Amino acid sequence: MLVGQPEPLQTQRLQLQPIEPAHAEAMWPVLRDPALYKWIDRAPPAHFSDVQARFARISQGRSPDRDEQWLNWTVWTGADVAIGIVEATVRPGNEVAIGYMFGADHWGKGYAREAIAAAIAAMSGAGAAGFEAVIDARNTRSLALIERLGFQRSEVRAAAQEEVWRRQSG
């Protein structure tokens, strides 16, 4: 399994910082937007303390049973504005489940593609074998994004209205 904590990453326009509880204040306005939860089975956080507690938990880097490694980043523009998160769960065999949420004000600007590509490149270089994203089949923006990142549809879960997309490392 990949080892260590996520490292800070830099792209042309973005900075990806390993998630820490101190980021909760900047991310609170982004993550409480109901538009982000239209396609995922989770409600917006009710309180700032919910974001802070979640960031404290996932910044630990491992699941409580130690079976999974968690690599999670907050995403910032060059102006130090928090715009989203990229989450990666490394499973046995170095298979990585990717998740992401970006503020609606920042959709359509290529930020998610840029940030996810940087995270994938870093994890590929650290030994990730492959990547998987599970996306609501009605979320056409996210489906197009993941396809642009080189993922291919591998499974359709019609009952759950989900599609599973995979790509090899590299």
Image (cartoon, grey):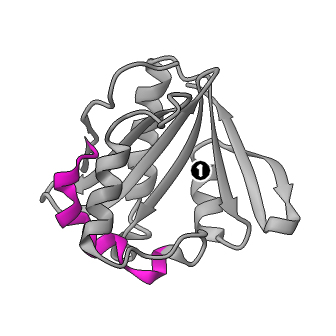
Horizontal and vertical percent position of residue 96: 58, 34
Give the labeled residue for mark 1: 148
Query: Position of 27 compared to 107: left or right?
Result: left
Name which residue lies at 34% across and 60% down. Answer: 84
Most common secondary structure along the magenta stretch:
helix
Name which residue lies at 48% across and 41% down. Answer: 88
Which one is in front, 125 or 160? 160
Above or below 146: residue 117 = above
Which one is in front, 7 or 45? 45
Name which residue lies at 50% across and 24% down. Answer: 124
Q: Quadrant of residue 42?
A: bottom right
Which one is in front, 30 or 61? 61
Q: Residues within 10 Å of mark 1 (few under 14, many from 20)?
A: few
Magenta stretch, residue numbers: 18-36
The quarter of the rendered structure image containing the C terminus is top right
Residue 34 is one of the magenta-drawn residues = yes
Above or below 122: residue 148 = below
* Disc 1 residue type (three-letter): Arg
Query: Position of 85 compared to 65: left or right?
Result: left
Can you name the residue that lies furthest to the front here?
Answer: 65
